[in-house]
Image (tube, grey):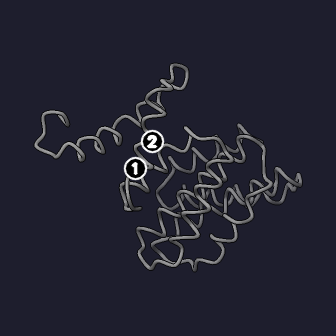
Amino acid sequence: MITESELSEKDKEIQNLIADGPLELLNPDKSDQKIREEIKKKIFEIPKFNSTKFMLDCNSMRFYSLADNEAIVRKIIEKYQVRESMLVKKSLFSLAINVLVLSIEENKFENIDFYIDFANKVPTNPDLFFYKSAMTFFTYFIQYKKNQDKSALQYCDTIIKSFCLVGMPEYGEELQKFKDKYK
């Protein structure tokens, strides 16, 4: 459909990237390094950060090492954290949350304070409540992992219950599975 559309060639390339990234992530056992490298290259060729580039960055984070992700996301947050746009704030939270997830998966917590501090400095409001809640879950989970602080797990359980109570049981279940897997 993209190829046959009347989009410009550049827009077709971007739309194909948007489609190829998640498809590539669905097949981790049969990853195509050529496609991954092409996606990474194309993302960096997009001249400015807009909603498409934020989405592509967020969706392709698994193509990069944790250290690369930390450097990329830190730079993005430093540059865009003062923006008033809610879309930008949500995008920055998504990137920061993904860095925490990757840090937990790799059990590496040396460089996470920057992302947690960023999240703590942003005032909570209804538009950001989901992101702040998710960030808080991962922050407490890291506290548990680093210090074996069982009280931190109780906060994680409270956040999971909160998601279930407010009509997001699927997300609550995903957090529970994540907690069980990495505990």
Q: Considering the image in quadrants, where does the N terminus appear?
A: top left
Query: Image quadrant of residue 121?
Result: bottom right
Secondary structure of the residue carrying numbered label 2: helix
Q: Is residue 126 left or right of residue 143?
A: left
Task: Name the residue type under label 1.
Answer: Glu
Q: Position of residue 116 (x, y in %)?
A: 69, 66
Query: Image quadrant of residue 17?
Result: top left
Q: Residue at x 56, y 39 (%)?
A: 62
- Which residue is label 2 attached to? 41
Q: Considering the image in quadrants, where does the C terminus appear?
A: top right
Q: CA distance from mark 2 to mark 1?
A: 6 Å
Placement of 54 over or under 60, stated as above or below = below
How crowded pointer 2 is (Cα within 10 Å; few <14, some 14-19, many 20+) is rated as few
Q: Residue at x 64, y 71 (%)?
A: 118
The tag on residue 66 is none
Q: Nearer the viewer, residue 8 or 105?
A: 8
Q: Position of residue 107 (x, y in %)?
A: 78, 43
- Which residue is label 1 attached to? 45
Q: Residue at x 77, y 54 (%)?
A: 142
Farthest residue toward the left?
A: 6
Task: Name the residue type under label 2.
Answer: Lys
Placement of 92 over or under 72, stated as above or below = below
Placement of 34 over or under 72, stated as above or below = above
How many marks on residues?
2
Q: Are marks 2 and 1 in contact (CB under 8 Å)?
A: yes
Q: Nearer the viewer, residue 175 or 18?
A: 18
Q: Residue at x 44, y 68 (%)?
A: 88
Secondary structure of the residue carrying numbered label 1: helix
Q: Is residue 123 left or right of residue 1?
A: right
Query: Image quadrant of residue 61?
Result: top right
Q: Is residue 177 left or right of residue 86?
A: right
